[in-house]
Amino acid sequence: MASTSATTFDPARALPNAAFRDQAWFDAELEHIWHGDWVFVTTEDALQNPGDQIPVTVGRQPVLLIRNQDGELGAVSNLCAHRGTLLVDSPANGKRIQCPYHAWTYTDGGRLLSVPFSPKGEVDKAAHCLPAYRVEAWHGLIFVSLNPDVESVATRFAGIDTVIDGRGLDGLHHWSEQQQSETWACNWKLAALNAMESYHLFQVHPETLEPYTPTKDAYYVAGSDRATATGGASKGQDDYILISLPPGFVGVLTGDSFIWQAVRPIDTTSCTVLTGGAFTSPPPERASNLAAKWLTKATNAAATLALPDFLPEDKAICERGQRGAEGDYQPGLLLEVERVVADFGRYLDWRLNQALVESRGA
Ligand code: FES
Ligand SMILES: [Fe+2]
């Protein structure tokens, strides 16, 4: 059972500093959020062809995403059922999965097919399959859950569907090869919260974002502990919609782009921040790995939202937040302009505290 008392807090206020430093918080999050809820892993275009395999990590668990021969998405453990070796360590394509250690070989559904140097009957193959996990796509985004009982992604994000319907998200091309990943020296929740709220734009991004998407023109659209949408004026274009899908995915949708950020935990004081985008044009034929090149090269007018300078500004303010986390303070009031922060607090409270009660049938 989770350390319910260790994660008690008031969702109407800012999170207590314990949330950003205590191992008890981190352990509860790993168990009930990263290993118990849906986790965004990549975009669907990364697995376009039958046989495509992509290794991802969900919480602490290595998972292999697979597009099988029938074109269906699957997710299995990426650890060999023999002695636990990591099976696939970079994107690959094949009908089978073969371990690099002793060549135990599996189908693309995780069924054990062959065991070299083993007489017939020595290994019960049915008992040595790769465990399969839940995997679902939502508007080109792929989510995996290690929890077989979690509600479907479609149910989870239904409230957001009505907001983005007709805004062209499904017509955009994701540029998965241009995704960028970096490590930030802050708790994952500092990065996630920062990505959600538009309150800080005028102060943290006076030159990069505020001139295009000012704080004063941001507004709340719809939300709950499941997902939240906000909006705002976007210079020279229709308003943008910002969707926050906890625990760690945030995307900004304009008429012709979808720029997103996904946060994953490393430990109490560091996290991974993955960024990516979808645009009206298909990705360039030959992808460049130069950092953030896709951001500056995107010809869409909407790419003004993706000016390359804003991410270091966010990183700096989040790491500054972490520098204060060893001290204590009385969590402050959340304003109406940052209502999404309260929604995120309610999400945490739901997953860390209430979901346990629900699952026990109380
Ligand atoms: S560890 Fe995979 S075949 Fe031995
Ligand atoms: Fe920011």
Image (cartoon, helix red, strand yellow):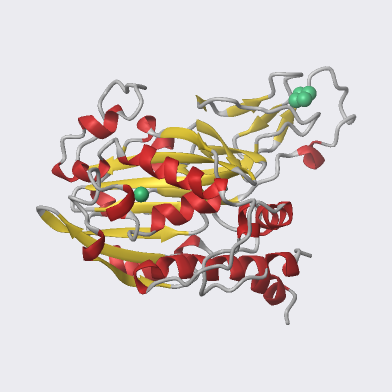
Residue sitting at x 39%, y 44%: 314
Say above or below: 350 vs 32.
below
Instruction: Pinpoint residue 67: horizontal percent, then vertical percent.
Output: 49, 38
Most foreground residue, 225 or 202: 202
Residue 183: x and y in percent read 52, 35
Left or right: 81 in relation to 266: right
The residue under the point 53% across, 53% down is 189
Q: Is residue 298 left or right of residue 36?
A: left
The quadrant in which residue 293 appears is top left
Can you give x and y, in whole percent of width and height, for residue 221 in the image?
31, 71
Q: Would you say 74 lies left or right of 124 here? A: left
Give the answer, above or below, for where 20 lies relative to 76: below
Location of the C terminus (image quadrant): bottom right
| Any part of residue 137 in sight | no
In the rendered image, the residue lying farthest to the bottom is 362
Q: Quadrant of the N terminus?
A: bottom right
Q: Nearer the viewer, residue 272 or 286?
A: 272
Identity of the residue drawn at 70% across and 70% down: 356
